[in-house]
């Protein structure tokens, strides 16, 4: 495989995502990069490193999509975060190419999927980092003793990061805007201690089943809409209003024409698979 052929494989991901052999492309890129580094071609090695990242972003997005389609929502959520982090890293090196490998589509889709997940609370550990090392030169780093390499920069085709070698967890907090999205708060079974997934994935389930392919276009609008009172006949007048305002039903939505609930309206670029309803979904 030549470099031009690899670039074409990455550019036409929409058409070939199902048939291309990512492992072969990855192996080719690694061997081209090795040769570039051996020849001292720093810029070429850097470009190849960015192509490797592009391939892994595309593959991770495809994996996240497949996980959501298969109903593995938490796994899909974690993979979406992998994609998000990899894009954040690649962006400063790569802005001219961002459009051509469908990275822009992926970035936007990942953000939109993330906002539709039901997770609102996360565990955030607080760390005390005792020592860390540079991934490029292996030297111990401190604020007073920098090694000269910058995190996120590419040296000899490798991304520089800091490897933490000694860490102490000093506490945890529950937060709504975590630095690591995978630390979702789950309940556990009081008897077996097994993890229980208490979340309602109706929106993601609908979206994933409605989309046939990972690069199908879609958008959504979040609004509120009044639902008929007949749906909430089980709620008493003096109980809390089903709109979750915290007020009593009789003092909130009951005197109005319906219960105000979040409403998500999706638009899709392609018609639905047969048997599926078009357009709207309420939660
Ligand atoms: Zn270093
Ligand atoms: Zn209400």
Image (cartoon, rainbow, N blue to C red):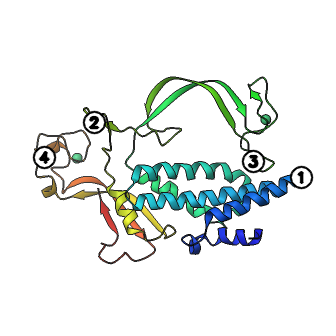
Q: Which quadrant does the N terminus fall into? A: bottom right
Residue 210 placement, left or right of 22: left
How far is mark 4 from mark 2, CA to CA? 28 Å
On whether ligand 2 comes within 8 Å of the CB at mark 2, the answer is: no
Residue 140 placement, left or right of 182: right
**Which corner quadrant of the figure contains ligand 1?**
top right
Q: x, y (%) of residue 104?
A: 60, 62
How far is mark 4 from mark 3, CA to CA? 60 Å
Of pointers 3 and 2, the one earlier in the residue sequence: 3
Q: In this figure, which residue is indicated by the disc labeled 3?
A: 158
Circle 3 — which element? strand
Mark 2 burial class by Cα count in 10 Å: few <14, some 14-19, many 20+ = few
Q: In this figure, which residue is indicated by the disc labeled 2?
A: 189
Circle 2 — which element? loop
* CB atoms of marks 4 and 3 within 8 Å: no
- Residue 96 or residue 136, whichever sits in front: 136
């Amino acid at each position: 495989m030549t470099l031009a052929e690899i670039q074409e494989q990455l550019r036409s991901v929409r058409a070939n995502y199902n048939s291309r052999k990512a492992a072969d492309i990855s192996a080719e890129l690694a061997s081209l990069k090795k040769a570039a580094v051996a020849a001292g071609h720093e810029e070429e090695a850097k470009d190849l490193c960015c192509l490797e990242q592009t391939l892994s972003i595309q593959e991770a997005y495809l994996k996240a999509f497949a996980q959501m389609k298969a109903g593995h929502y938490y796994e899909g959520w974690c993979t979406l975060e992998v994609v998000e982090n990899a894009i954040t890293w690649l962006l400063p090196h790569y802005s001219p190419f961002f459009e051509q490998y469908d990275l822009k589509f992926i970035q936007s889709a990942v953000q939109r999927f993330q906002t539709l997940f039901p997770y609102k609370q996360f565990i955030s550990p607080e760390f005390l980092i005792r020592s860390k090392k540079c991934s490029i030169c292996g030297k111990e780093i401190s604020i007073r003793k920098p090694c000269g390499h910058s995190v996120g920069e590419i040296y000899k085709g490798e991304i520089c990061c800091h490897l933490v070698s000694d860490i102490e967890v000093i506490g945890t907090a529950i937060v709504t805007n975590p630095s690591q999205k995978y630390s979702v708060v789950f309940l556990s079974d009081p008897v077996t201690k097994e993890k229980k997934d208490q979340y309602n994935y109706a929106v993601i389930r609908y979206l994933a089943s409605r989309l046939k392919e990972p690069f199908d276009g879609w958008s959504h609008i979040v609004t509120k809409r009044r639902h008929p009172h007949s749906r909430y006949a089980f709620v008493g007048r003096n109980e809390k209003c089903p709109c979750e305002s915290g007020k009593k039903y009789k003092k909130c939505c009951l005197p109005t024409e319906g219960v105000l609930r979040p409403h998500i309206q999706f638009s899709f670029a392609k018609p639905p698979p047969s048997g599926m309803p078009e357009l709207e979904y309420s939660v």
